[in-house]
């Protein structure tokens, strides 16, 4: 069974801080990993994805994520957050060839205080 | 402009009434999805559609059905709504089967009294 775990339900930081949102998965096969962002009252928006190659992938708005096979992780990072980064962040995993069905984490709510 | 639209955005129904949620996309995406989102449960897949009249149950299909007669439209139907179907419903689309990036609509907040 594939699972995605986001260990922190809530993270609070100040504007200008760096942040890391954690995502761990359990699956042994070939997978895609991705991050989505959901601002309050809106649908989810794609941030970035990893399938192969360079384990550090760049996304929009200064976000990046690093894949680690040994840790079964795909943590999301940003060097300097802005108040507009306040949102819920979802990690998702997809088995290659599994007809686009994503397995979602429960999300991490990021609050950026001014 | 790539967009997924959902109508209505807010809906209040009484238990036992029928509910129709509509979703449209202007990207000619093959694959479309219906999810519900509840606090503490995250996103749960209700149905997935691989193309016109090619629909498949997701993880929680009970109490729901879908219809896709045109590639750009995907409807979610609740026959005789129940109070535990109160939720926020999201429609999403992706270019094709196997394509990873999903585009989401703004959601429909359904309240069943």
Image (tube, coloured by chain):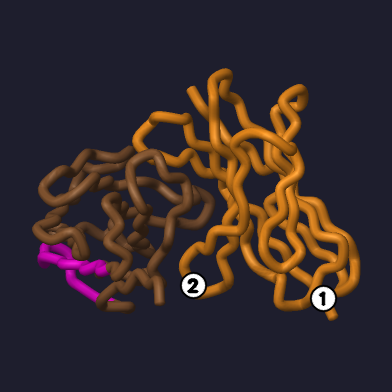
Q: Residue at x 40, y 71 (%)?
A: B2
* Residue A85 image label: none
> Range of the magenta residues?
B11-24
Instruction: Assess whether residue B20 is covered by the magenta stretch.
Output: yes
Task: Name the residue beneath numbered marker 1.
Answer: A113
Compared with residue B1, is residue A30 higher up or lower down, i.e. above or below? above
Q: Chain of mark 2?
A: A
The residue tagged with tag 1: helix, strand or loop? strand
Q: Residue at x 54, y 24 (%)?
A: A30
Where does residue B11 sit, x and y in percent of width and height?
A: 26, 76
Image quadrant where one finds the C terminus of chain B = bottom left
Chain-order first, disc 1 or disc 2:
2
Where does residue B61 sit, x and y in percent of width and height?
A: 24, 43
Would residue B84 be visible to someone looking at this image? no
Q: Which chain is brown?
A: B
Q: Quick check: A5 left or right of B20?
A: right
Compared with residue A73, is residue B52 higher up or lower down, i.e. above or below? below
Where does residue A3 sit, x and y in percent of width and height?
A: 55, 31
Q: What hue does chain A carry in this figure? A: orange
B56 and B101: which is toward the camera: B101
Task: Name the residue beneath numbered marker 2.
Answer: A42
Estimate the spatial distance between the alpha carbons at disc 1 and disc 2, rounded to whole Å. 20 Å
What crowding class fits label 2: few (fewer than 14 Cα within 10 Å), some (14-19), or many (20 or more)? Answer: some
The residue tagged with tag 2: helix, strand or loop? loop
Compared with residue A25, is residue B18 higher up or lower down, i.e. above or below? below
């Amino acid at each position: 069974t594939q699972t995605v775990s986001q260990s922190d339900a809530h993270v609070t930081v100040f504007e200008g801080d760096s942040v890391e949102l954690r995502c761990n998965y359990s699956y042994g096969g070939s997978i895609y990993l991705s991050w989505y962002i959901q601002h309050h009252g809106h649908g989810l928006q794609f941030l970035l994805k990893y399938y192969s190659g360079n384990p550090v992938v760049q996304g929009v708005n200064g976000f990046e994520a690093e894949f680690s096979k040994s840790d079964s992780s795909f943590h999301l990072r940003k060097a300097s957050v802005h108040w507009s980064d306040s949102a819920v962040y979802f990690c998702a995993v997809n088995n290659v060839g599994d007809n686009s069905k994503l397995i979602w984490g429960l999300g991490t709510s990021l609050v950026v205080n001014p | 402009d790539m967009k997924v639209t959902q109508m209505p955005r807010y809906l209040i129904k009484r238990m036992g009434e029928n509910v129709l949620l509509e979703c449209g996309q202007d990207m000619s995406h093959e694959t479309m999805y219906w999810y519900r989102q509840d606090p503490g449960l995250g996103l749960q897949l209700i149905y997935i559609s691989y193309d016109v009249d090619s629909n498949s149950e997701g993880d929680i299909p009970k109490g729901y059905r879908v219809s896709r007669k045109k590639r750009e439209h995907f409807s979610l139907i609740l026959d005789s709504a129940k109070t535990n179907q109160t939720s926020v419903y999201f429609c999403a689309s992706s270019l094709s089967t196997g394509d990873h990036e999903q585009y989401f609509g703004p959601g429909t907040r359904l309240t069943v009294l």
